[in-house]
Image: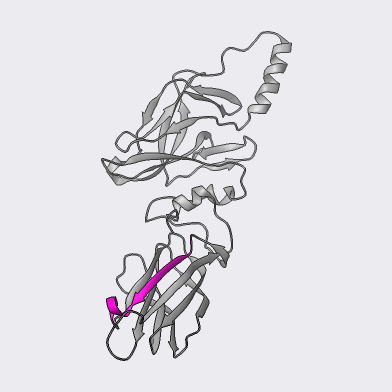
Amino acid sequence: MGGPGSRAGTSGYQAQNTLISSTLIGIDRSEMVPGPALSGAITEPSGPIDVDGQPFMITSRGPLRPPVPWSTGGYYYIKVATGSAWNKKSLVTVASTTPPTYDPIRRGLYFVNSNGTRERCLNWIVYNDGRNSGLATPFRIAMGRPQFHIENFLDIDGLDTKWSFQFTAGDVALGRPASASLESLTHGRSSVLLINKPLAAGGTFKVSFTATASGVNSYNYTIEELPHGSSSRIVKGRRNVRNTPSPDNFVDTYSFSPYSRIHLYADLSYRGIARWGKHMRISNFKVGVSQEISPLMRHLLNLNDF
């Protein structure tokens, strides 16, 4: 990274430089593009980047290797480190176990060292999927959004992440409404997994959907939790619906642990043999929380395809 250049010798130029510097505080116009997982994300010539009040430029294109073995995968940050001269800096990658914090005076992200010194962090977080054929994908940290106070203080470390917040139940859907069908001709009277939704952060969630049946005496469904690393399901709620042609509108609130899965199981009860027309439909299945989440958070929580 190249520095701001030599300072002018007149007081008039110094005043102008001071004015320009004040408008650049916290600026980060760096650019990055995906690169091979083995090599890391690629920096493009770009800038300026404010480092303690001094604007720097990235002057060459090159990859930034992950700070851990590429096969491990996961997220990492990019730090502006001391270079070979006062006006030169270097870029190094930093594991996501030591996240940066926002400095309101410098208006940027900085790593705070044990001795109190601070080092600039670019407004990027990179995901390396740990596969030969995969990509190291950079995501820009959006400064100034209301969600930033959440995004900035996450301790991101794959499945070992300990998120610093919990969802609370509400009417904001985490993803697109889902639907499913349980056909007697296909599944008979056996219990079938119809909906399977993964969670990263825990908390309380509002689960809602509509069940509609035809040609059956009754049907049952259960909302279950499959905790991370366990094969034992936990029943959160169940319902048995008998002899009703009317849709059953289900709404309830449950707590789920981080990295668990929300399961919806159902089965049918009917007379005679299985045939077309004996079935049950699930529509408008939604998992609701109390707040909108940003695109970065949606990616980190694996909710893009929720």
The quarter of the picture where residue 169 lies is bottom right
Q: Nearer the viewer, residue 89 or 277?
A: 277
Please give the name of the residue rendered at 39% of the width and 90% of the height, measured from the top-left corner: 217
Q: Residue 233: in sight, yes or no?
A: no
- Image quarter (top left, top right, bottom left or bottom right) of the C terminus: bottom left
Q: Answer with left or right where residue 231 lies relative to residue 101.
A: left
Tell me where the magenta segment starts and ends, as one range. 176-188
Q: Nearer the viewer, residue 267 or 124?
A: 267
**In this view, 5 is above or below 199:** above
**In this view, 133 is above or below 147:** above
Q: Answer with left or right where residue 123 lies relative to residue 195.
A: right
Q: Nearer the viewer, residue 257 or 98?
A: 257
Please give the name of the residue rendered at 51% of the width and 22% of the height, measured from the top-left corner: 57
The quarter of the picture where residue 41 lies is top left
Q: Answer with left or right where residue 73 lies relative to residue 84.
A: left
Please give the name of the residue rendered at 35% of the width and 65% of the height, measured from the top-left corner: 228
